[in-house]
Amino acid sequence: PNLDKKEDSDTTSNTLSLTVLKKDWNTVINFSRKHVYVVCVYFLFQSMFVLATATDSLELSFAKEVLLLTDSEYGFLVSIAGAGFILGAITNTILSKKLAPSFLIGIGSLFIAIGY
């Protein structure tokens, strides 16, 4: 695309305003009412991430108090987890062209559970 091309006179600028926010929320609400299944799957998937984040807050206490890890050992553990997230993102990028999104969401949820 030509990024230097001037905007057409027909297009409007959507600067952040109360009117734009109301219009966007109406679009989201209308979509949510028409596609309840998609919204339910989305919220279930996001709930998994919230629970995983809550587990992360307990991870440090468990590693230090129960496993008796030093700061450097815990740092290494976190680095391995970060490498796993990067590897998962690369794998997801490659597979997203070959597999259905519903399958990727399901298998991603499974691997997140295995990882924790």
Image (cartoon, rainbow, N blue to C red):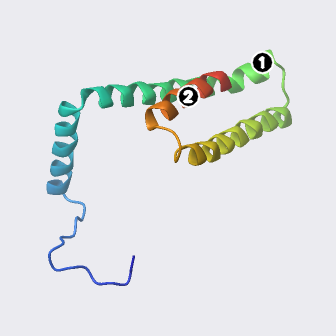
Quadrant containing the N terminus in the rendered view = bottom left
Q: Please, is residue 47 above or below residue 72 in the view? A: above
Instruction: Return the mark for residue 18.
Output: none
Q: Secondary structure at mark 2?
A: helix
Relative image position of residue 17 (x, y in whole percent) = 20, 59
Q: Give the residue type that dot 2 points to.
A: Ile
Label 1 neighbour load within 10 Å: few <14, some 14-19, many 20+:
few
Residue linked to disc 1: 65
Give me the residue at 56% from left, 26% from top.
Answer: 52
- Residue sitting farthest toward the front: 98
Mark 2 vs 1, N-terminal side = 1
Towards the viewer: 106 or 76: 106
Residue linked to disc 2: 107
Label 2 neighbour load within 10 Å: few <14, some 14-19, many 20+:
few
Give me the residue at 19% from left, 37% from top.
Answer: 29
Towards the viewer: 58 or 40: 40
